[in-house]
Amino acid sequence: MSDKKLVLLPGGAGYIGSHTAVVLLQAGYEVLVVDNFSNSSEISLQRIENITEKKCPYVRGDIRDRKLLLEIFQQYDIYAVMNFAGLKAVGESCKKPLSYYNCNVFGVINLLEVMQERNVKTFVFSSSATVYGDAPIPYTENTPTGIPISPYGRTKLHIEQILSDLYNSDNAWNIAILRYFNPISAIENGLLGENPQGIPNNLAPYIAKVAAGKLKELAVFGNDYPTVDGTGVRDYIHIMDLAEGHLRALNYLENNHPNFNIWNLGTGSGYSVLEIVRAFEKETGITIPYKITARRPGDLPEFYADPSKAERELNWKAKRDINAMMRDLWNFIKNNPNGYE
Ligand code: NAD
Ligand code: WQD
C-alpha cells in the first residue's frame, strides 16, 4: 500500500486486539490503539512493536469518553475502526449487568456517534457465537439469533441490532460483524497471548495455568452431555487465524462498500473438553490432572460454526489445527509464566 491507512483499535492492547494489530501492521496498515487498560497492559503494545518493527501508538482512555474520542478523530486521519474494547466475563456480567451494558453498549454507541460526526463509517465489530443462543448446530449466519444466556451475550446482540438499524438509516456505513467462536492460543513467537487476571474462566487458559503449576487441577464441568464423550464441545480457533479474519473482513469492506455483513469466524470442527486436555498433553508432554464436576450453569452441550460464508466471501479459512493451538498456547505461558509482568 502506498497511502498508509490508519485503523483505530479501541481495546487494541487486549488479547484479540493485540494479535490483530500485528496482522494489520504486517499488512501495511497503520494502527492507533485507544485502551483504558482495565484488562490489559502497555507491555503488549511494546511487544507488537518488537514483533512488527513498526510503531503502535496508543492513547490511554475510555471509549465512553466522548471528548477524548472527538480529540482523537480531530488529531488523526482515521480510516476505519475495529472495536475490541469491552468487558467479556460471562459470570461477572450476571453480577454487574449495568457495568456491562454501560461499557459494551453505551461505549459502542458513543464511538459510533463520534464516527458519524467525523464521517468515518467503516466499522468492524467483535461479536460472539453466543448470539445464536441454543440454535441447532452448526450455526450459519442465517441461523436466527436466539436469546443469549448472559447479560454479556445480550450486549453483543444489542449492538448487532444497533448496527443493523444504523446501516438501514444510512447505507454509507460499511459494517462487518464478526461472530467469534472460541478464540484460544497465541502468536507463534510466544510474545503475545491471553493474559487473564486471577483465576481464568475459560478452558484453554485454565489448562495452561494447571500445566504451569499455578492451579492444582482442572474442573471438567459435566460429563453427561449428549456429546462424543459427555463433555462440552466447542469450536476452538487459533487467535492468529481469527486475527487474519479481521484483515480479510477489512479488505472486503474496502472492495465492496457500502456494506453490512456478518461472518462467523470459526473452524467448523468441535472438540470436547477431554479431547482438548488430551491434545494439550500430547503436544506438551505435560499431564493435566482433572476431576469431573457438576455442569456449569448456562453452558450449552455443543456448538460449532459453519464457516463457509467467510471462506466463500472473504477467502478466509482457519488453517491452524488443534495441535498448533496447544503448542502455541503453551509456548506463551511457558515464556510468560506471570503474564506480561
Ligand atoms: P480483552 O479483555 O483481552 O480486551 C479488551 C480490551 O478492551 C482490553 O485491553 C481492555 O483494557 C479494553 N477495554 C475494556 N473496556 C474499555 C473501555 N470502556 N474503553 C477502552 N478500552 C476498554 O478481551 P478480548 O478477548 O481481546 O476481546 C475483545 C472483544 O472480543 C471483546 O469485545 C469481547 O467481548 C469480544 N469477544 C471475545 C471472545 C473471547 O473469547 N476472547 C469471544 C467473542 C467475542
Ligand atoms: C469451553 C468448554 C466448559 C472451563 C465463553 C463465552 C463466550 C465466548 C467464549 C466471549 C465448556 C468447559 C471450561 C473450565 C470446563 N466469549 N470448561 N472447565 O463457555 O464456550 O465460551 O468464551 O464472547 O461468550 O461464554 O468457553 O472456555 O469457558 O468453555 O470444563 O474450567 O470448557 O463447560 O464446555 P465458552 P469456555
Image (cartoon, rainbow, N blue to C red):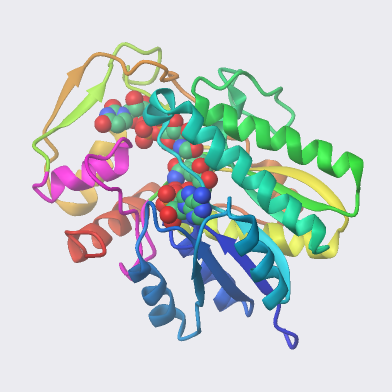
The N terminus - image quarter: bottom right
11 and 223: which one is in front? Answer: 11
Magenta region, main secondary structure: loop
Residue 25 vs residue 216: left or right? right
- Image point (50%, 34%), residue name: 100
Residue 181 vs residue 288: left or right? right
Residue 243 picture location, percent across and down: 54, 59
Residue 161 picture location, percent across and down: 74, 32
Determine if residue 28 is in view. yes
- Image point (44%, 62%), residue name: 13
Residue 23 picture location, percent across and down: 54, 69
User: Is 91 placed above or below 254 here?
Assistant: above
The magenta region covers: 185-214
Q: Quadrant of residue 327?
A: bottom left
341 and 229: which one is in front? Answer: 341
Q: Furthest-front residue in view? A: 67
User: Is 64 placed above or below 335 here?
Assistant: above
Q: Quadrant of residue 199?
A: top left
Residue 52 vs residue 245: left or right? left
Magenta-span inclusion, residue 205: yes
Residue 84 picture location, percent across and down: 54, 53
